[in-house]
Image: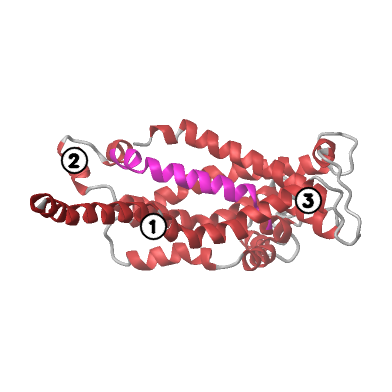
């Protein structure tokens, strides 16, 4: 009996340790969720809840000035695909304008910042100053950019036409009132404004490419273009995919430039989808239709993002 008691007493500490270890293990499973909780709460309140509420609104004839908001199901969506509906043709015209802006601006906003980043990544006097200069416009708000370029490009009193005339060039270019100049007036300022942001992202990616790769390429006799093609581009592939994705998404929700610079001219051919959605919901009080348009636009952007990651992201190691 004494031996049994001694063995039991000797085994007690081990058993207690195992119990404490098990309790600690079970408690540790919830630790990551505790750290994630603040973000999940904010994400749920400011993203998931508004998204769900917007989807609910899109299923109603929702005029926020009227007490009655009847349920209409998918009618707000189906009407957008009807050529005789109130908002359908104008909505797809604004989607076409958004697509035109995206197709013309994205290639410039992906390639030009890459070239600038490669140059600014070199060692030369004043490099920090040039980096600040290129990034400077991005800190300005879209209202400032819109008013500034509206003044510069005004066909009648704009500075651009004035100096073109001084140089003996045509001084009557309708920058903001006719096509294709309207697209030049939207894409050009947008590239100037957001170029610095993409450049900074590329610069961060360039810092992660080891110098040893360039030294090895130089030893093998590679010139500058060959080093860029076989070292820089492969090393920046994940960054390029990221820049391409956020640039496409940003161009797809363009609003301020169209509203302030061209004001939709000519004949609302440069009116973006976001502008039309805001006008439908906030000025014409048709929040149900506007919400349906928003989800269709979001669906397009989601599909484009998936395509980018499917065909480009899969090659990223």
Q: Is residue 176 magenta?
A: no
Q: Quadrant of residue 132?
A: bottom left
Q: Secondary structure at mark 2?
A: helix
- Residues 254 and 299: in front is 299
Q: Secondary structure at mark 1?
A: helix
What residue is disc 1 on?
A: 31
Percent x, y of residue 154: 72, 62
Percent x, y of residue 173: 71, 53
Instruction: Tell which circle, 3 or 2, labels the residue nearer the N-terminal end.
Output: 3
Q: Secondary structure at mark 3?
A: helix
Residue 65 got which mark?
none
| Circle 1 crowding by C-alpha within 10 Å: few under 14, some 14–19, many from 20 | few
Q: Quadrant of residue 215?
A: top left
- Residues 179 and 48: in front is 48
Residue 15 vertical placement versus 233 (above, below): below
How many numbered marks does the figure carry? 3
Which residue occupies the extreme front position in the image? Answer: 1
| Circle 3 crowding by C-alpha within 10 Å: few under 14, some 14–19, many from 20 | many
Q: Is residue 234 magenta?
A: yes
What residue is disc 3 on?
A: 57
Residue 218 got which mark?
2
Instruction: Tell which circle, 2 or 1, labels the residue nearer the N-terminal end.
Output: 1
Instruction: Tell which circle, 1 or 3, labels the residue nearer the N-terminal end.
Output: 1
Using residue 246 as the reference point, say whether residue 218 is left or right of it: left
> Where are the magenta residues, as a range?
231-255
Q: How is the image coloured?
A: secondary structure
Using residue 306 as the reference point, say whether residue 273 is left or right of it: right
| Circle 2 crowding by C-alpha within 10 Å: few under 14, some 14–19, many from 20 | some
Percent x, y of residue 225: 31, 39
Residue 132 vertical placement versus 281 (above, below): below
């Amino acid at each position: 009996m004494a031996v049994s008691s001694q063995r039991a007493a000797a085994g007690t500490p081990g058993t207690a340790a195992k119990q404490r270890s098990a309790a600690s293990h079970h408690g540790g499973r919830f630790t990551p969720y505790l750290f994630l909780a603040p973000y999940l709460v904010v994400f749920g309140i400011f993203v998931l809840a508004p998204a769900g509420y917007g989807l609910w609104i899109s299923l109603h004839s929702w005029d926020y000035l009227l007490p009655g908001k009847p349920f209409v199901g998918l009618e707000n969506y189906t009407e957008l695909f009807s050529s005789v509906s109130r908002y359908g043709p104008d909505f797809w015209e604004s989607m076409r304008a958004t697509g035109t802006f995206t197709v013309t601006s994205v290639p410039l906003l992906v390639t030009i910042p890459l070239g600038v980043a490669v140059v600014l990544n070199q060692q030369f006097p004043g490099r920090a100053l040039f980096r600040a200069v290129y990034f400077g416009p991005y800190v300005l708000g879209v209202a400032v950019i819109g008013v500034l370029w509206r003044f510069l490009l005004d066909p009648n009193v704009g500075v651009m036409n004035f100096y073109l005339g001084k140089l003996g060039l045509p001084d009557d270019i309708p920058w903001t009132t006719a096509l294709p100049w309207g697209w030049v007036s939207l894409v050009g300022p947008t590239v100037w404004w957001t170029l610095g942001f993409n450049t900074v992202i590329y610069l961060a990616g360039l810092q992660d490419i080891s110098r040893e790769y360039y030294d090895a390429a130089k030893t093998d006799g590679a010139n500058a273009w060959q080093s860029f093609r076989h070292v820089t581009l492969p090393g920046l592939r994940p960054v390029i995919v990221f820049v391409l994705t956020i640039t496409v998404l940003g161009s797809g929700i363009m609003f301020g430039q169209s509203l302030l610079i061209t004001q939709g001219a000519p004949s609302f051919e440069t009116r973006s989808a976001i502008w039309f959605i805001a006008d439908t919901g906030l000025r014409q009080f048709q929040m149900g239709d506007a919400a349906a348009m928003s989800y269709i636009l979001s669906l397009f952007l989601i599909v484009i993002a998936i395509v980018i990651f499917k065909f480009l992201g899969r090659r990223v190691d």
